[in-house]
Amino acid sequence: MKIFNYNTVQAKDAGEGTSKVAVRWLITKELVAENFAMRLFEIEAGGYSPLHTHPWEHEVFILEGEGQVFDGEIATAIKAGDVVFVPSGEQHQFKNNSKETLKFLCLIPCVKK
Amino acid sequence: MKIFNYNTVQAKDAGEGTSKVAVRWLITKELVAENFAMRLFEIEAGGYSPLHTHPWEHEVFILEGEGQVFDGEIATAIKAGDVVFVPSGEQHQFKNNSKETLKFLCLIPCVKK
């Protein structure tokens, strides 16, 4: 069993296409997680992930703050306590249009289809 | 894409072997989640899940409150922001020895080995 605080895992820039987005890979294949990985994203005020699509799903839980999820046509407000399921193949973008940091968990399958 | 607050999903008694434990199945196979399921557990003060083991892993994120994880030998304190990875086949029990409700996400693979 592994028990640790999320703050002990280094936050890294989330990379190409993102703005003001950091990611912590909390549970990964290296931790013998064979099926799915847990990441924690922090988007600063004004930041966003790219509008993109891929052949695997996201399971998201909003931990802190407020923002929007954009599906290419409609932007939907999200806040702490909200759940977002993005099916494989659907466009999605997370935006922080608030003044506070937006934090959420985003889980993905380890074996991408 | 599905977006909803966790409070909109009914909390059900977590069943045999548990005490003062409610579970909300947030993301399931019925939501076309092929790989893993997201559940939110709420353990009231004094409640606990059974000490048990099974051939699939848990990926846990503590949302609110404090409690303990017991592995059959050692009880480790947990609090909001902590991550718990329980590998397949390891004994585990969640206890709420505090005075406030303990809330956590617990994700499991849909296809149990």
Image: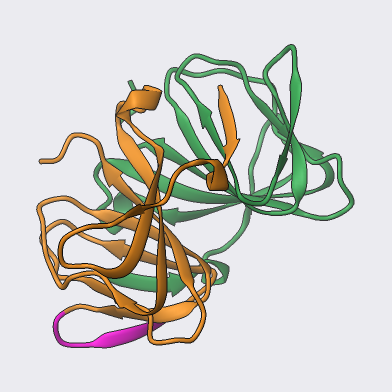
Chain colours: A green, B orange
Q: How many marks?
A: 0
- Residue at image coords 16%, 61%: B16
Q: Residue furthest right?
A: A99
Q: Quadrant of the rendered structure where residue A51 is? A: top right
Q: Nearer the viewer, residue B52 or A93?
A: B52
What quarter of the picture does the N terminus of chain B occupy? Answer: top right
- Residue at image coords 39%, 44%: B38
Query: Where residue B42 sits in the image (x, y, percent)?
Result: 42, 63
In the rendered image, the vertical position of residue A8 relative to residue B2, given as above or below:
below
Q: Quadrant of the rendered structure where residue B61 is? A: bottom left
Query: Where residue A32 sits in the image (x, y, percent)?
Result: 24, 54
* Position of residue A46 in the picture relative to residue B36 (left or right): right
Query: Where residue A111 sits in the image (x, y, percent)?
Result: 30, 31
Query: Where residue A71 sits in the image (x, y, percent)?
Result: 67, 18
In the rendered image, the vertical position of residue A104 relative to residue B68, given as above or below:
above
Say whether residue B28 is visible. Answer: yes
Magenta residues span: B72-77
* Position of residue A97 in the picture relative to residue B34 (left or right): right
- Residue at image coords 32%, 37%: B36
Q: Nearer the viewer, residue A80 or A94?
A: A80
B6 within the magenta span: no
In the rendered image, the vertical position of residue B19 relative to residue B10, given as above or below:
below
Q: Nearer the viewer, residue B107 or B10?
A: B10
- Residue at image coords 74%, 11%: A73
What quarter of the picture does the C terminus of chain B occupy? Answer: top left
Say whether residue A110 is visible. Answer: no
* Position of residue B71 in the picture relative to residue A68 (left or right): left
